[in-house]
Amino acid sequence: MAAADDSRAGSWQAWADDVAAAWRLPGHGAAEDPVSAALAGFARFAESVASTGGAGVSAQAFAERLEQLAAALPAALDGEWFSLPFTWSAAWPGAAAEEALDNWLATTTRWYQQALDLPALGPQREWLEAGAAVQRARLREQRAGAALARHYRAAIAGALTRFAAWLRDDDPPAVTSLRALFDAWVGIADAAYREQVMQADFSADFGAHVNAMSERRAAEQALARRLADAAGLPHRAALDKMAEQHAALRREIDALRAELSRLRAPVPAATTREAEHADVARSAPQAGDAPHADATVDAPARSAAPATRKRAVANASKRRPPRERGKSQRSTTTAARKPAREHRGTGDEFDIERILRQEE
Amino acid sequence: MPRIELSPEGLSREAGEIGRRAARGLATVRGLGRPRPGATPREAVWRSDDVTLYHYEAPSSAAARVPLLIVYALVNRPDMVDLQPDRSLVRALIAHGFDVYLLDWGEPDATDRVLGLDDYVSRYLDAAVDWMRAALSRPAVHLMGICQGGTLSLCYAALHPLKVERLVTTVTPVDFHTSEDMLSHLVRHVDVDALIDAYGNLQGDVLNALFLSLKPFQLMQQKYLRFIDGLDDAAATAMFLRMEQWIFDSPAIAARACREFARDFYQGNALARGGLRIGLREVRLDRLTMPLLNVYARDDHLVPPAASRALGALVTAAPYAEHELPGGHIGIYVARTRGHALASVIGDWTGAQA
């Protein structure tokens, strides 16, 4: 396993790259492969540790190194320090550049926003409006993302500072392996991250970012719907409408099926309104409910009479055996079993088609 | 100042050992093939749309056994309850005398986005319970809810109290506004209606990312290094791969159900505060009458113990017991089959109730 880059030969990163390359499954990139990613992160950690020592690593030197990293964030995140899960936020500039970028963004965004806010004119005005809505939403998402990235950066800085403080602690356990040091880092980093996340303004900024994403996506969907209409294609609203109608029909069929089962069942001595109160006698086996009815009986839909059971078992035996998963097994009937144990019903009492045939 | 005893030679040795172990492990992993969760023979006995009721094979007469329906969450798949023979809650429950059924919610697709909690609770779950009551000739069944499945079971039991003989909730969120609840904190300011309108079904990958973000360093880094540590052990590696498949084999959540759960439970905290409605009916936990056992995990980072224990104050008309188990949100289920603590707690409680 030789490092490809001579300048990195013998480094932890080269080692991790080599191990990860050996590990990586064909067709899996590093981003998809958590083992390789973990190895690479561990290597960055190891490089940071190793870079502090000469003949050996001192806690003092390592703590100083961490504090330097915390002060240099986010530049330190860029490859030198292991930065999950904030890799994407590392691309955001540091505090010094941030102010300049904020100013630049504010200015350019203002110009852009002003352009986007201009009323659309001409025969294509509705298309222009829809396109501008997408761009406005993207700007809002960008701003919300930047606000959230600041929290992630603060979480990393907090983790590094805490870790340094732990290293400077007067009475910590002796650390005799890199893995033990790494495990200590993980515990401290997650605790620091949690502390940041649990702040009220993180929650607000997280929500704002998700909301901005939703807004952007809705704007894109509106544009896509316009395109679909123009191309004569169905769009999601049409499919949703169909799905809603289908679901409503299924609910109705299920309610009818339950009602038919109840009517066909050997009727117990009495029927009882569904228990709405806690003091309903629990011992009454015939009492109960149904999902969408105000007052129903609750007799368990017992298996049909022996003759019916025999026929139902025969029907059931003709069915394809159920597979564990898969849409192809989607069924409007509920029986999905082999003729089997005597203690179980056949499921055919829920077979609406069979019941309706018999009713005829 | 801690004593760090790391020399350059020691670091090199450690790196070399990790590399060798990873390389050896590659062969181990290749030899294991694709992991297949599931250890106990089972049969699909009822199905409606994508929802399936499974019955697990028991070695002796099922007639004398206590029928128990496991209601899983809409999040993740239920394979975790029967991961492998020596790590199976199902087998442990069977060993404790239960006749085990499991409700699998299936995998919602785009056409299922209109399914709401009313569909899941009062249509699918209710129909499955009715099937069991009919098939077993019993007026009511025992329910065991897992995580969100426990929340749904509570709703079901409150709406249909006569169909539930006993209820066991495990790592079940009830109060969604406890101070330690990270998920609730993240969701607090999200415009759920806008999110669901724009994205539809909440995809499993999004949920996975959210869960990973709760402990990112442990779950995205340390976990895989520990995996490498254990690569010499083929059995441990196989179990890791099964768990990994289960964790990331996540179905989407139907849009309407997701909207209702996030808005009414996570944001509104209506189950604890009161005023929750499923369909047209109000869910009132103070109307639960059946004996109820509430089990929570001491180190649960997804459902903090306080979020589960809140149930005790809300259940006023039912015999209530709660039990703390050491371990995390998943660990209490995938414990060793022999001496499975959760199964023992449920078995003992059920025996004491009988």
Image: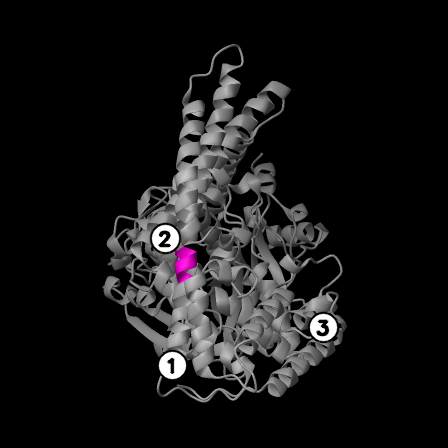
Asked which secondary structure carries label 3, the reply is: helix
Q: Is residue B340 magenta?
A: no
Q: Which sits earlier in the primary sequence, circle 1 or circle 2?
A: 1
At x 56%, y 78%, the residue is A50
Q: Main secondary structure of the magenta part?
A: helix
Q: CA distance from mark 1 to mark 2?
A: 66 Å
Disc 1: CA contacts within 10 A as few (<14), some (14-19) or many (>=20): some
Along the line of sight, which residue is nearer the eye, B73 or A104?
A104
Where does residue B219 sit, x and y in percent of width and height? 52, 67
Can marks 1 and 3 be said to lie on one chain? no
Where, quadrant-wise, is the N terminus of chain A in this rendering? bottom right
Colour mode of the rendering:
one colour
Q: Amino acid at mark 2?
A: Gly
Q: Could you tell whether B343 is left or right of B186 in the image?
A: right
Asked which secondary structure carries label 1, the reply is: loop
- Of the residues tagged 1 and 3, which is closer to the observer? 1
Q: Which residue is mark 3?
A: B29
Q: Could you tell whether B288 is left or right of A31 in the image?
A: left
Where does residue A57 sit, x and y in percent of width and height? 52, 83
- Label 2 marks a residue whose chain is A
Q: Which residue is mark 2?
A: A288
Where does residue A296 sit, x and y in percent of width and height? 37, 45
Q: Which residues are magenta?
A: A151-155
Q: Amino acid at mark 1?
A: Arg
Residue A197 at least partly seen:
yes
Residue A342 at least partly seen:
no
- Label 3 marks a residue whose chain is B
Which labelled disc corresponds to residue A168? 1
Q: CA distance from mark 2 to mark 3?
A: 52 Å
